[in-house]
Amino acid sequence: MRLSPRIQRCFGFFVVCGVLGVTGCSAARPPEAAVAQAELAVRQASESKAPAYAPTEFRVAQEKSQGAQRALSAEKYDQARRLAEQAVTDAQLAQARANAVEAQKNAEETRKTIDALRTEANRPTAP
Amino acid sequence: MFNKQIVFSLAGVSMIALVASCAGSRPASLDRAQSSLRQAQQDPLVARYAPGQLSDAQSTMTQAERAWKSDGDRDETSHLAYVTEQKAGIAVAVAQQKSAEDEVQRLRAQRENIRVDARTREVQQARVQTEVATDRAQAATDRAVAATTRAQALEQELTALKAKDTERGLVMTLQEGVLFEYNKAELKSGAMRNLEPLITFLREHPDRTLLIEGYTDSTGSDSYNMELSQRRAEAVRNFLAANGISADRIVARGYGESYPVTTNTTEAGRQQNRRVEVVIAHEGQQVAERR
């Protein structure tokens, strides 16, 4: 069956929009800001206790940030943006976990000093 | 011949079909995110210490759901679901950190209390020890004062006795005139007055022994003077005995004209030589007789 030109144009419009909707309209702009943010977040985490106390989480953040840069170079912009956003959150998680470990170690240390103090205090003193 | 209405609805239906068939089933990542989020929501520490972080995770979850339901974007949905999980993890970690920090504060306060208690006990003990030391020092001072008082009393006694402190003992010299008439061996009535201080002293110090020595000048024979001085010494001893001083403590000796204190060529000198010396032994000693 032959469709009128007007209907053909409308149908084509829907198809194009559908294709664009599937691949993502945001494919237009390179996510340089997001990738830069990811690099910054990873650098910040590297200067904290994260590499020491949350090494796995930190490594994940590092790898994602590097992946985002590679995707950016390869013009895979959607992938680059997503990896960058994930790297930021991964870096934040690494720092949060490291902080938690540090605080818990602190609490343990303090508990130990109290035990030691109690032992010392209860020891009978010389007359 | 297709009319416009049928065409547009066909296009609409095919759009929906396109979206639905391309999208597929609900991503597992969404369910995982949902589960992590629910766990975080149910954690009482998270509610207390990380409500902001939890809220952030919740809004990302909403975005993920919208990416799926409205846009059918599988990749974006998975991405947002992953971010949601990580943010839920952040909320939990922050809650753990803050809760541990609160614990440290509480423990530090406890530690301070223990230190304060221990220090208080130390201070109390130190105070007790100081008190003990002060009491001891006071007792020592009291003893010293008592000793000084005794020494002063003794000095006063010596002054009353008009005695000289010598190696032999305390030597009290009584001229002939205060005790005896010239050439006599009976004590004068006024003798009591001069011997009173000696009696007092001997009563105060019952442990002391004494030696009464009688001396004359060189006038007359040796044997006469020897006998006179002996009888005079004995007279003093008898007097003391009569006044409560045991004779056991007293040795009476006459030395006649021996051991003069000054020249016999003048009357003044001879008067001085005519005397009785009472030698009181020092504490713990016996009097050594002259010979």
Image: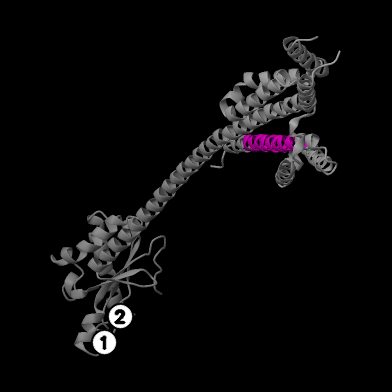
Q: Earlier in the sequence, mark 2 or mark 1?
A: 2
Residue type marked 2: Glu
Which quarter shows the N terminus of chain B?
A: top right
Q: Is residue B234 visible?
A: no
The residue stretch that appears in magenta: A83-112
Foreground of the two, B104 or B12: B12
**Circle 2 residue:** B257
Say few, some or many: other residues with alpha carbon within 10 Å of mark 2 (under 14 / 14 to 19 / 20 or more): many
Residue at the extreme left: B189
Which quarter shows the C terminus of chain B?
A: bottom left
Report x, y in % for residue A119: 62, 35
Q: Main secondary structure of the magenta part?
A: helix
Q: How many marks?
A: 2
Q: Is residue A23 above or below residue B276?
A: above
Report x, y in % for residue B128: 44, 43
Residue B276 is tagged as none
Q: In the picture provided, is A124 more to the left or to the right than B236?
A: right
In magenta segment, residue A99: yes
**Circle 1 residue:** B264
Q: Is residue A84 above or below residue B188?
A: above
Q: Is residue A103 above or below residue A8?
A: below
| Cα gap from disc 2 to disc 1, whole angstroms | 10 Å
- Decide: marks 2, 1 in contact (CB < 8 A)? yes
Chain letter of mark 1 equals B
The residue under the point 26% across, 57% down is B241
Q: Secondary structure at mark 2?
A: loop
Q: In the picture provided, is B129 more to the left or to the right than B169?
A: right
